[in-house]
Amino acid sequence: MEDKVKDTIQTGSDKWWKRAVIYQIYPRSFADSNGDGIGDLQGIIAKLDYLEDLGIDAIWLSPVCRSPQDDNGYDISDYQDIDPMFGTLDDMEALIREAGRHHIRIIMDLVLNHSSDEHRWFQEAKKSRENPYHDYYVWRDGVEGEAPNDMRAAFGGSAWEWVPEVGQYYFHQFSVKQPDLNWENPRLRREIYDMINWWIDKGVGGFRLDVIDQIAKEPDKKITNNGPRLHEYLRELSRETFQKADLVTVGEAWGATTELAKLYSNPDNSELSMVFQFEHICLDQIEGKEKWDLAPLPFMKLKEVFARWQTQLCGRGWNSLFWNNHDLPRIVSRWGNDGQYRVESAKMLAILLHGLQGTPYIYQGEEIGMTNVQFGIEDYRDIETLNLYRERLEKGYSREEIMRSVYAKSRDNARTPMQWNDEENAGFTQGTPWLKVNPNYTEIHAAAQVNDGDSVFACYRKLVHLRKEYPVFVDGDFRLLLEDDENIFAYTRTNKDSRLLVICNFYDRTVRFSLEEDISDMELLVTNYRETGSAGTLRPYEARMLYLKK
């Protein structure tokens, strides 16, 4: 692996991760090796051949550290151990080693905004105000039953929890079992840096940092993200850890703007490689409301958002490119067509995204066109979904209205087990899966696609390899075409040697188009229909990626 890494650094734009494609694994839903119904590290090791075939460069591993699993691992009780449901620390070291033999790096998911309330730090912190760990968390004086202010937690209820042992409230932006860490404490920061360097020494290839824009919170001022000391903390974090190795780092930053992203992903490497920003992801909800309040996708706004991030970060930062993750519904069910045109629309969305400048992320199952699911509420496991259902019932919403939102936006849409084959439980487990398998696994599964040159998987594999073959994917300037077209998303990427053209019909109707430039000499790199289409017409969800060497 070392030779490949060295070659990539020397021949790439300037960082290996600019030519990379990263694959996200949600471990409990990926592959179960021991029949307990929960995916594990040995299960991932068993699927490395599949991932190498796809061509990906790194695996972003959702949290596998020891955790009570109140929020599926995003409540860490020991940052330097592996949760037994996934295996052991030896298994983790084996995964890092075996992935390296497949030319794949492992990216750890770290939760640095909060810990579990079962972490030894918090167990000490709540013993007394004089305990040295007390200041590792955010506390405020008050009277039981009268919270310091009216801030709400993201998962529902007050953001404050009373602890009678110390006569204070602690602050939690998420579950009550996820107390926020106090980054103002330099001793806490040093413990975090030592832990990260411990993982770097074990050979990890990078880190994804959960809700990292919230570490500089100021709850007295009701500031949760983008606090005044945020970038000071990030520069110190990078200097003390990330800059010591050849890593990729990506921060989850729901409040990021293009201007903030230039700070996060400054080419001087002072903070992070890139951030996950969610401006495009938040478009299909009623403005000013929650994600559950559904609205039609404003397609013209989608084009504007993508174009703005592409142009404003060019040369001054770096984009992450994604449609899906463990918190989002399946994109083919969201903005594609998971019925008649599932294959075509899944490929179209892939072609559209992978031609852009940035590092693409593929979420497990996306590469085979997995879809959303519709369970009864008793079969959902996601804490956010269950809280939403309860709270909206109490507010008088009808069950039908609530379930429409759940079917569209529940995080469990992304968390149903990976569909490997058409055998029992989709080949995910020989036991009872922790979350039900999507019933359509008999038609949609990896085994049917890996050797099918016309499959969704084949399209993704082609796109992954094109990014490594053509420098224009990394350094080409972006230009939006057909800006006023209400059906077509088209753009070019141009560098000194070549031009890439991507043109996509976003809907289920045939449309005509006309471009100013002559494209007759361009090579068709990838498309999503078997038969060649006509020059000025796009069929439902048709996508074409063309290339011209100057």
Image (tube, grey):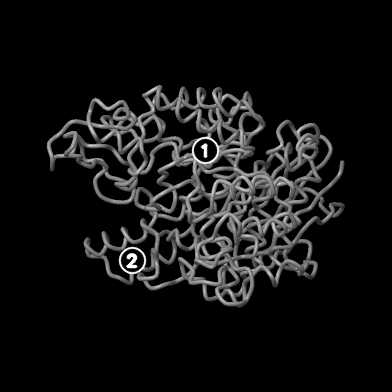
Q: Quadrant of residue 137?
A: top left
* Sequence-first tag of 1 and 2: 1
Q: Helix, strand, or loop for circle 2?
A: helix
Q: Residues within 10 Å of mark 2 (few under 14, many from 20)?
A: many
Give how far across and how far down residue 67 sits, in percent: 42, 48
The amino acid type, in three-letter code, at marker 1 is Gly
Identify which residue is drawn at 37% across, 24% down.
Answer: 185
Q: Are dots 1 and 2 in contact, CB under 8 Å?
A: no
Q: Quadrant of residue 96?
A: top right
Q: Is residue 339 above or below residue 122?
A: below
Residue type, numbered disc 2? Ile
Count of numbered labels shown in the rendering: 2
Q: Nearer the viewer, residue 451 or 69?
A: 69
Look at 44% across and 41% down and name the residue there: 78
Residue identified by numbered label 1: 251
Q: Position of residue 20 (x, y in %)?
A: 70, 43
Q: What separation in Å lies between label 1 and label 2 (alpha carbons)?
A: 31 Å
Residue in the picture at 23% in, 42% down: 161
Q: Tell me the residue that label 2 is attached to.
A: 402
468 left or right of 109 in image: right
Which residue occupies the foreground of this view, 90 or 195? 90
Question: What number is the disc on residue 491?
Answer: none
In the image, taking residue 396 as reference, residue 484 lies left or right, namely right
Q: Position of residue 64 (x, y in %)?
A: 51, 49
SS label for mark 1 = strand
The quadrant of the picture occupied by the C terminus is top right
